[in-house]
Image (tube, grey):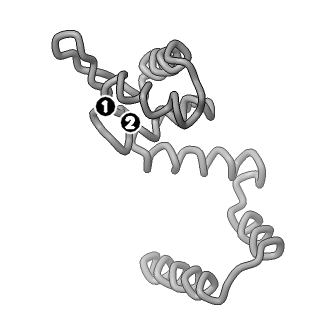
Amino acid sequence: MKNVSISDSELEVMKLVWDKNPITSEEVIEELSDKMSWNPQTIKTFITRLVKKKVMAYNRSGRTYYYYPLVSKDEYVKEENRTFLQKIYDGAIDKLFLNFIKNEDISIEDIDRLQKLLEDKKHNKE
């Protein structure tokens, strides 16, 4: 994914597009008007911005526009994680995990899951 900045508000639109692909602007407006208390014009502005940023596109059928993502949710999350890691921890993933483990309450089940993930990752690298 190219380094594209998506605002928190735009992300709310993208979440809908990822979940309900394709989705009409009317459906986006209906969902977000209630959830976020935004007016329809504000939502249309977010949709337009996302299309301009080339993270979302549309197909037109008659007078209806169907929006779909050009960037997958996985791609977006991976890029956001990488950017966060670089910005906060200078790219050092061990610092992120050490800080998280020291400062968060982690259940035994979570520890077991993390340990298994790390073991699986280690075996896949060998």
* Residue drawn at (38%, 41%) of the image: 18
Q: Mark number for residue 23?
A: 1
* Residue drawn at (70%, 48%) of the image: 86
Vertical relation: 90 (above or below) 113: above
Q: Mark number for residue 17?
A: 2
Q: Is residue 33 left or right of residue 22?
A: right
Q: Nearer the viewer, residue 104 or 1?
A: 104
Residue 52 appears at what percent x and percent y? 45, 15
* Residue drawn at (76%, 77%) of the image: 105
Badge 1 amino acid: Ile
Quick check: marks 2 and 1 in contact, CB under 8 Å? Answer: yes
Classed neighbour count for the residue bearing mark 2: other residues with Cα under 10 Å, few (<14), some (14–19), many (≥20): many
Q: Nearer the viewer, residue 117 or 113?
A: 113
Q: Residue 26 falls in which quadrant of the image?
A: top left
Could you tell me which secondary element the residue under label 2 belongs to?
A: helix
Residue 126 appears at what percent x and percent y? 45, 81
